[in-house]
Image (spheres, helix red, strand yellow):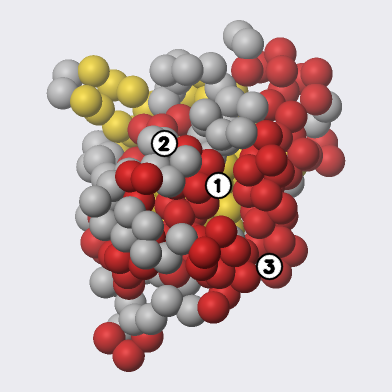
Amino acid sequence: MLNVTDLSLHYGESQVLYDVTLEARAGAVTAVMGTNGVGKTSLLRAIAGRHPFSGGRVALDGHGFARLSAAEAARNGIAYVPQGREIFPLLTVTENLETGLACLPRGERSVTDRVYDLFPVLEQMKDRRGGDLSGGQQQQLALARALITRPRVLLLDEPTEGIQPNIIKQIGEVIALLREEGDIAIVLVEQFFDFAFGLADDFCVINRGRVVLSRPKSEVTREEILSRVSI
């Protein structure tokens, strides 16, 4: 579904990513792991069109992009849930969800019951402003807004950060359900190791902007991943 090949990224004169290659399959969770500051968020931002990459290629179903804007990424089926959520605090829950519809054809721009089946709390709080929600509720709103775009690729950046344990469990169940349905390739950046390890089918470990391990779960041990993450 998603292929990233030899991707490099700079912030000004500083190079952050070096020839990163990543593959994410539909119906699977690819966990991108590493310590803080190694380039994980930069990788997601590049795939999502949030920051131009300086070399390499991003491809969806074999169709490659040497340059990709955020609007193009969304229209082509890449949905991004950023670290920090980025919901609109003064808009209602419903209005926040509706902001995700712009990339869809005009006739498909509606908030479906599917969102509320996955996140029942959002239906109860339709008219509440986003800024009045708890951190966990905001995270569910951000994830729901991404799913409204009917993505083929879902990028999740630290979805458990600052979230209470019961909401972490609910988010994990939603990710597992999406994986089982088999339609979406999920790329998960996550510091909570047990959460990521429990959900992942494939691992990509990054250190200092380079991939140091890329293997399916069946071919790597928990200890090996931890040792690579802590290099």
Q: Nearer the viewer, mark 2 or mark 3?
A: 2
User: Mark 2 or mark 1: which comes first in sequence?
Assistant: 2
Mark 2 residue crowding within 10 angstroms, few (<14) / some (14–19) / many (20+) = some
Q: Secondary structure at mark 1?
A: strand
Q: Is residue 186 above or below residue 188?
A: below
Q: Residue at x 26, y 57 (%)?
A: 91
Count the numbered circles shown. 3
User: Mark 2 or mark 3: which comes first in sequence?
Assistant: 2
The residue at which mark 1 appears reads as 187
Q: Quadrant of residue 108?
A: bottom left
Q: CA distance from mark 2 to mark 3?
A: 25 Å
Q: Which quarter shows the N terminus? A: bottom right
Left or right of 156: which side holds 172? Answer: right
Residue 109 in the image, given as x and y percentages of width and height: 34, 81
Mark 1 residue crowding within 10 angstroms, few (<14) / some (14–19) / many (20+) = many
Q: Secondary structure at mark 2?
A: loop
Q: CA distance from mark 3 to mark 1?
A: 14 Å
Q: Are marks 2 and 3 in contact (CB under 8 Å)?
A: no
Please state which of residues 164 and 201 is positioned toward the viewer in this rendering: 164
Q: Residue at x 30, y 32 (%)?
A: 9
Mark carried by residue 83? 2
Q: Secondary structure at mark 3?
A: loop
User: Mark 3 or mark 1: which comes first in sequence?
Assistant: 3
The residue at which mark 3 appears reads as 182
Residue 112 in the image, given as x and y percentages of width and height: 48, 79
Residue 127 in the image, given as x and y percentages of width and height: 37, 64
Q: Residue at x 33, y 54 (%)?
A: 129
The residue lying furthest to the top in this view is 231
Left or right of 37: which side holds 54? Answer: left
